[in-house]
Image (cartoon, helix red, strand yellow):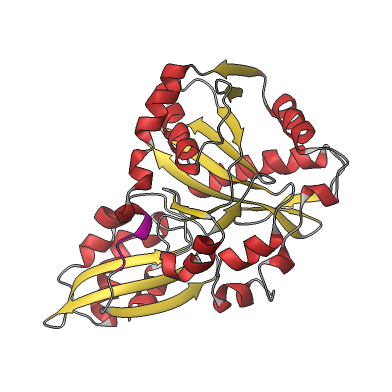
Amino acid sequence: MKHIYLPPSDITRKLPFHLAMEEYVARQLPPDDAYFFMWRVNPTVIFGRNQIIDNEVNLEYCSENGIEYYRRKSGGGCVFADMSNIMFSYIEAGNDTVTTTFSRYTSMIAALLRSLGLDASDNSRNDILISGQKVSGNAFYHLPGRSIVHGTMLYDTDMAHMAAAITPSAAKLKAKGVESVRSRITTLSRHIDMTIEQFMEYTRTHLCSGEIHFTDNDVRAIEELSQPYYEKSWILGRHKHGALTRKKRIEGAGEFEATVELQSGCIKSVNLAGDFFLCADIDSMLLEKLRGVPYSAEAIRSTLVPLHPERIIPGLSAESLTEILI
């Protein structure tokens, strides 16, 4: 695996730059190796592709405290990052399932932490734990022929900002058996006697056997690629107000909020929001197939069964999705 370096800069680049850099790596670098880089940002909330911003981000608090917020292209939940938090980006060739890719990546990072003498493990979904407390959360998405995993590594962070800027639902917290964001996490600084820079250098040497140095031309191309992440329509999303709304948490799949528009007793459109992961295009392969279907459990279920929702959203069966929509 090769580590990627950027040209030296006096500026702290915003989050969209680093998300676009993942895309640039996936599209421009040869598929004969895996690639890895680390980055840090000023206080920023990062929420998943399918999440509803009003449900996940305390926009007033963020505005008052200079905290930026952006939507990413991967699924999963909402996270907070600042300069005491390290972000990892991992890009590999192939089109493996989300479960296979996560397992390979989280096992690698857990082994990295165990090499430092920590009681580290990866759980069944996307987290890395130290002594049962979360130190890293990760998300996943596909580009043609490439799999991308990115996530947090909490060296240290402003817990007050984290707890106030992110607003997870009571259902999510209840499902995890905790009372707050703060109670279920830990930081590396509590467990290792290394500075953040020393830990980053250790990570590079432990995980990577080669390196690639990007040029100023690469940086300019990445900056151009990052522009859609700043668009208001992308950040705010496409949640439609005034339609039927159904909320449900499916164990092993995530939290869902379905918005259903009806016309003459049939489904006109469906939007599915939440912290779930995607293995394929949810619109063309699933949601668009529901247009015109009578709004009844029997009709929806019979439509969904041959579409195999579990192949698109891991852990979500046709029966479970029917329960969400009705």
Q: Is residue 123 above or below residue 110?
A: below
Give the camera-side residue of 195 and 187: 195
Q: Position of residue 196 (x, y in %)?
A: 76, 38
How far across and down, in percent of the image, does residue 69 sit? 48, 54
| Tally of marks | 0
Q: Residue at x 59, y 30 (%)?
A: 36
Tell me which segment is drawn in magenta. 235-239
Q: In this image, 40 relative to 241: left or right?
A: right
Look at 43% across and 69% down and name the residue there.
54
Q: Quadrant of the C terminus?
A: bottom left
Is 238 inside the magenta-drawn segment?
Answer: yes
Q: Position of residue 203 (x, y in %)?
A: 72, 32
Q: Is residue 144 visible?
A: no
Write the residue at 56% across / 17% down: 212
Q: Is residue 290 above or below residue 27?
A: below
| Residue 36 in sight from this viewpoint | yes
Could you say which quadrant of the image residue 175 lies in? bottom right
Secondary structure mainly formed by the magenta segment: loop
Determine which quarter of the picture holds residue 108.
top right
